[in-house]
Image (cartoon, rainbow, N blue to C red):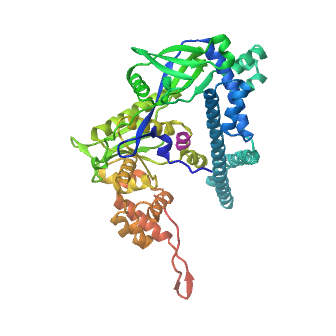
Amino acid sequence: MAKKKSLYAELTHRSYSRQKDDSGNRIPQLRRGIEAQLPFHPFLEDWGFYYQSFFHSAVNQLQKGQTEDQIEKEFQKRFGIEWAWADSLATDAKSTYDQLVTARENRILELSKDIESGWKAVSEGIEDLENRLKNPTRQNFQGFEKKLLGLESKTSRLIRKQGDLDRLLSQKRLHICFGGVKLFNSQHHLEANNYKSHDEWKSDWEKYRSGNFYSIGKGRTPGNNRVAGIFYQGDDNFTVRFAVPGFLREDYGQYVYLTFEVTGQRKHDLLYALESNKPVTVQCFRREHKSDQWYIHLTTYVQDVPRISSLQNGCIGIDLNAETIDIIYVKRDGNPARTSGKQIILSFPIPTGTTGQNQAALRDIVCEIVKLASIYQCPIACENLDFSLKKAQLRHSGSKHYNRMLSSFIYDKFRSFLVVRAEKSGIEVKFVSPYMTSVIGMVKYMAKYGLNSASAAAMVIARRALGFKEYIPHLWLKTLSPFFEPEDSKDGGFGGGWGKISYWLKIYSIRRPRLFQPDTVLRFLLDSLTVASPKKPRRRRGKVTAISTSVETA
């Protein structure tokens, strides 16, 4: 298995060109995407159909063990297409094949974690029901049947998931349905899916399996692409010149020319790429939901934006939780900055609505955050969370808020939008460990600075990016000294000391607002831990008696 990329490496659009500067270092560059509408031409439909047919064959050949080079040579002879088209086909197919392999590995890991967490939850549920049966009071039997049915449902689901995992592990061939499983299955229920006949369904099926082709860019060639060259015509107009595959030239000639329009910053980016001999990769596709309109998407590279942010100017911390996105600006000395006597704190509700509405709202939020970072010329810090694994583990936690949060695409999209937007503005994004950020924030900074728990967690994230260590407060160490280990005083935010505090807050049900009164909480914890701690039995009047270990809750 290949080494997993870091989160930043997966999200960044920054790369390094083959060109080198005077010092011999490769020049950084940013990837840009440019999209425009194309006028209709029958060549797009015909080549889109044949390209996808060849593409499906290429993916199958990869599953049989052929290499990209073998597919490239075979397809030139087999289908009579130029080397550049065959090269693009093989590269496109290899990329899809690699994605399938990665998706399979991720699915296996996700199922394994889901099943492991699920059986653990089932075991805890059974233990809870057994304890209720041992003490059959009315309160203990309240909701008993409902919980029993829930455990039965959960067990059935886990058995199904185990079957899915076993099948995945036993299958050697990767499975993919070009055109979509939903559309494929609709042939068995034509009337329910508004089809009058099987021929009508087949027409849609063939359409959805076609309508897309791809060409790899190449610098220092006419149009910066060997078979889909891009040329500037003046004003906002550009032309794409498609080299027609040999078997279609009788119908369309050697070349097909189509004009499209690009405006604003994207126009300047495209002109820079063309003049700098940057490769321009072309993908043409049909959007069925927009009246079968064809579009062209260009991927190229532009100059890297010099970084203007510095940790010397402080850092902006971001905490993503179930309901809000909270931001705080922390100065270089680790304290929240103030303007006109107020702390610089922002809080945005998690967007709700359609996918398009959510993406638009997220982009607006990201713009505000990056704008604030540009004003203070400081980096932005986020938690380095793996939501895919967290989703599998928290499914069985019983928390509806976090299940909804982790099931949403919002968090991955937010980080992706943040990194891309920040790079365009020269702002660095740092990803830090999420370990105990909420607990540390509540214990150390919530009462001290009058913050809510989310803003306090964001402050811990920013301080972590600035290089600060989060030691347990002296008052906590002194008050609860019998229950800490000597090394806990050196816990800089990643050791067992903070783990103990988190555990105590949980088992004694200490709610967040109570931490605004740390003295009261510490007295309660000291009393509770003293009562609950095991003690040696003592003799009284010749008999051995044990001290009661009942614990009250906060």
Q: Residue 100: percent from the left, percent from the top?
A: 65, 39
Q: Residue furthest bottom?
A: 542
Query: Can you say whether 137 is above or below 400 in the image?
Result: below
Residue drawn at x 31%, y 46% is: 310
- Considering the image in quadrants, where does the C terminus appear? bottom left
- Could you tell me if residue 63 is visible in this image? yes
Q: Does the magenta-highlighted stretch encompass residue 201?
A: no
Q: Residue 369: percent from the left, percent from the top?
A: 36, 37
Q: Nearer the viewer, residue 375 or 470?
A: 375
Query: Can you say whether 215 is above or below 547 in the image?
Result: above
Q: Nearer the viewer, residue 1 or 500?
A: 1
- Could you tell me if residue 182 is visible in this image? no
23 displayed left or right of 216: left
82 displayed left or right of 499: right
Residue drawn at x 54%, y 14% is: 257
- Choose top left, top right, bottom left or bottom right for residue 523: bottom left
Q: Does the magenta-highlighted stretch encompass residue 405?
A: yes
Residue drawn at x 71%, y 32% is: 74
Give the residues in magenta: 401-406
Q: Residue 404: percent from the left, percent from the top?
A: 55, 39
Q: Residue 285: percent from the left, percent from the top?
A: 58, 22
